[in-house]
Amino acid sequence: MKYVSTRGSAPSLDFAGVTLAGLASDGGLYVPAQWPRFTHDEIAAMRGLPYSELAARVMQPFVGDCLTPERLRELTAKAYGRFAHAAVTPLTQLDERQWLLELFHGPTLAFKDVALQLLGLLFEEFLAREDGSLTIVGATSGDTGSAAIDAVAGLDRVEIFMLHPKGRVSDVQRRQMTTVRAPNVHNIAIDGSFDDAQAMVKRIFADRDVTDTHRIGAVNSINWARLMAQVVYYFAAALQLGGPDRKVAFSVPTGNFGDVFAGHVAAQMGLPIERLIVATNVNDILHRALSAGDYSAGEVTPTAAPSMDIQVSSNFERLLFDVGGRDGIALAEQMRGFESARAMQLTNAQREGASALFTSMRADEDDMARGMRWACEDCAEIVDPHTAIGLHAARVAELPHDVPVVTLATAHPAKFPDAVERATGTRPGLPARVGDLFAREEAYRELPGTYEAVRDHIVGHSA
Ligand SMILES: *Cc1c(COP(=O)(O)O)cnc(C)c1O
């Protein structure tokens, strides 16, 4: 399998190459040169497989020659063996047509574990082959940081520097990062916002003084391997609900468009999907883009669903590439226009291509609270604020009556206890597996919000 950049001029790479590269050298994102496709019978034959077996089957065509089927199965068994539920991503029924796909049974209680637990193992595997090492630099507004740190803590060939905006992540989220004690983990709290942290990370990737001596890697969802791992649970859910003989719809709480893009990939691979509902909060650039073609970024409004408080959704570029004729040179120009004006119109081809599978919905804080209350009072389920936005969208979407709707439950409610308690009166407790999070000692470095301070720290503290 070869991978090409959405901006058309970076060299194509194999799976190991894209896993270690992150962003393409032309500023684009890597996507497979063509979608592998399963037949109806091949999909039907996946029914009943344990999750780690299913994962190896679904991912093998993307991995190509870079891993043998046996080695890939070993890695998926190891990655998903760390989940607290034997089904890895169990489905829960809410009413006669609404379902929850619980993606929060990993070590850090958010869906990001599903992909990052595997990504850590892939880094180690591919770095060992070339006797190399990788310095991961990332910025987090919460869930990515803890999931990435957990996935790479203690690895020999990987070091991680994770920036978070000081005072702007929840206590649970910060402690999940800062209480991990491993020599390769470096937490940094910067004076500034998440966007400031993100901008510094982008500069590091482009700074020759750093990249001449360090190979810099990415753990956010610009990394193709993350999206690939997320394709698997769309298959898992659809197979349980009667797929491939019956179509299923999915509602996805969306920020950076990674999770829902994985649903698009599943559909391209032959999984019958009725609709993908892109659920946003009031930071609704994706809803405006999908419903009116208007992709223009505003200011971020902080909400109780912080992982969706995003204005520019990196992975949307992958969809625009795929449905807009896969013309990288034209897309590079369109994206350059967006980067200078922070606004663009989708082309007709992009709008029509996206509307074939995608619907979008915007939920405000009241809709979100109502989603949490409905789940609690009518279905005896406590859901987190992100999941509640997905549920709201799932319930108002207009779909054929015989189609089951699966909302992706992206975080455990105990990650956001205050918002859950406000809406439902119930304060969710942390599951036993996160242990004594509030008793453990924290370690992190506070730095001023200047690029030089962060760069010098990274260069000075990496082995
Ligand atoms: C990251 C995250 C999202 C958004 O996922 P994207 O792939 O960025 O669209 C939604 N909910 C939770 C809880 C998250 O951590």
Image: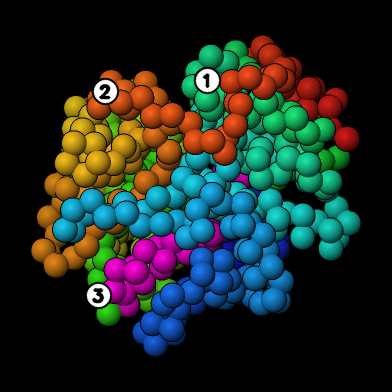
- Disc 3 + disc 2, Cβ < 8 Å: no
- Disc 1 + disc 2, Cβ < 8 Å: no
> Relative to 34, is 20 above or below?
above
133 vs 439, left or right, is right
Q: How many marks?
A: 3
Under mark 2, the amino acid is Gly
Under mark 3, the amino acid is Arg
Cα distance between the residues tagged 1 and 3:
43 Å
Q: Which residue is mark 1?
A: 171
Cα distance between the residues tagged 1 and 2:
20 Å
Q: Considering only order in the chain, which callout, 2 or 3, is on the residue closer to the N terminus?
A: 3
* Percent of width and height locating residue 427: 36, 24
* Percent of width and height locating residue 53: 56, 72
> Relative to 124, is 292 above or below?
above
The picture quadrant where one finds residue 320 is: bottom left
Under mark 1, the amino acid is Asp
Mark 2 neighbour class, 10 Å CA radius: few under 14, some 14 to 19, many 20 or more = few
Q: Give 208 or 275, whichever is nearer the viewer.
A: 275
> Relative to 92, is 299 above or below?
above
Residue 246 image label: 3
Q: Main secondary structure of the magenta part?
A: helix
Q: Considering only order in the chain, which callout, 3 or 1, is on the residue closer to the N terminus?
A: 1
What colouring does the structure picture have? rainbow
Cα distance between the residues tagged 3 and 2:
38 Å
203 vs 208, left or right, is left
